[in-house]
Image: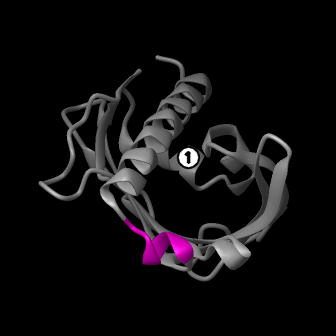
Amino acid sequence: MANVRGRAGYPGRVAVLNVLIDRDPQQVWDVLSDGSAYADWVVGTRHIEDVDPHWPELGSQIRYALGFGRWTIEDVTTVRLVEPGRRLELEAYAGRLGSARISIALLPWGEERTLVIVDEHPLTGPGALWHTLLVDVLLRFRNQRMVRSLARLVHERHPA
């Protein structure tokens, strides 16, 4: 499955998560490049409203509802950088809450494994203004759950 006990990338970057998934990078990319599967692995996503037919090309978007408990907001995620099979950089915009940068890099690790590096940080809005160690810890906790869900979905689509 996934080793979610990865360490922070370097001191001061608690939100950077390094995780091994026991599948090759193309199998992991298969899930990342499926915009309709976003709600299946991204923590907090209620449902997908619209996926750009060109996802994950540069500038393409996914529109979805994000929520916790009774609280729900409309969100849009835009591809800001893409290297197919290797790297996906996203900007998630949540209205007044601002936006966040989510970077997902895939590195081959041995013959049948992928090192997934997730780096998420607030860009604009209150999250960016009040970005603290506590925010990084919360992002890391969320991203650990997210990567476990990603690994589960990759394993379901690509059984050993």
Instruction: Give x and y (percent) for residue 33.
Output: 59, 56
Instruction: Give x and y (percent) for residue 109.
Output: 21, 38
In the image, taking residue 80 as reference, residue 68 lies left or right, namely right
Of residue 100 and residue 102, the one placed in the foreground of this image is 100
Please say whether residue 121 is visible from this viewpoint. yes
Which element carries disc 1, helix, strand or loop?
A: helix
Instruction: Give x and y (percent) for residue 8.
Output: 21, 46
Of residue 9 and residue 106, the one placed in the foreground of this image is 9
Identify residue type, mark 1: Asp
Instruction: Give x and y (percent) for residue 95.
Output: 72, 77
In the image, taking residue 17 as reference, residue 53 lies left or right, namely right
Per the image, is 72 magenta?
no
At x 55%, y 46%, the residue is 30
Which stretch did the figure color magenta?
126-131
Quadrant of the image containing the N terminus: top left
Vertical side of 91 occupied by 142: above or below: above
At x 31%, y 37%, the residue is 19
At x 82%, y 55%, the residue is 72
**What secondary structure prevails in the magenta region?**
helix
Return the residue at label 1: 30
- Asked which quadrant contains residue 44, the reply is top right
